[in-house]
Amino acid sequence: MSHNYQDSAVVFIDVINDFQFDGADKLITHTEKILPNMVKLKKFANDHHIPVIYVNDHYGVWQADLHQIIEHCTNETSKHVIEQLRPTKDDYFFDETPAFRIFPDAITITIAGN
């Protein structure tokens, strides 16, 4: 049986995370439980040419790009999650809108490899 994934995408929300907030211990525990399946899902998407889209907080780094956000978020708690789910050059990365943009409902999209 052949599957058509033409209208499909995988969306990861806030997986590039520093886990430095109240309640982060619970989030990292849950994240670690589902991390192997998230990695499998990303591989499946890549193997089947399904777009992988990351939507992420900018962490107050107002003019940040993907690499700056990763650098900002990487620490002892988050490193293993970020290493396994880091966007590749073929993925899309959306920076959640900073509060002071001219168009507050807009989001910025970049190709992760840029």
Image (cartoon, rainbow, N blue to C red):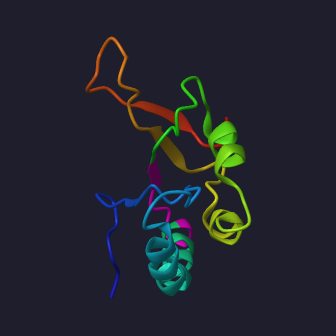
The residue sitting at 31% across, 26% down in the picture is: 106
Taking the view exactly as shown, the residue that stands out farthest to the front is 22
Is 94 rendered above or below residue 100?
Answer: below
Quadrant location, the N terminus: bottom left
Please provide percent x and percent y for residue 66.
62, 40
Q: Is residue 7 left or right of residue 20?
A: left
Image-quadrant location for residue 4: bottom left
Of 46 and 27, the residue lying toward us: 27
Quadrant location, the C terminus: top right
- The residue range painted magenta reads 46-55
Please provide percent x and percent y for residue 33.
49, 86
Of 106 and 32, the residue lying toward us: 32
Image-quadrant location for residue 103: top left
Please provide percent x and percent y for residue 92.
51, 45
62 inside magenta stretch: no
The residue sitting at 61% across, 43% down in the picture is: 112
Of 69 and 41, the residue lying toward us: 69
Q: Is residue 49 left or right of residue 96?
A: right
Q: Is residue 38 left or right of residue 78?
A: left
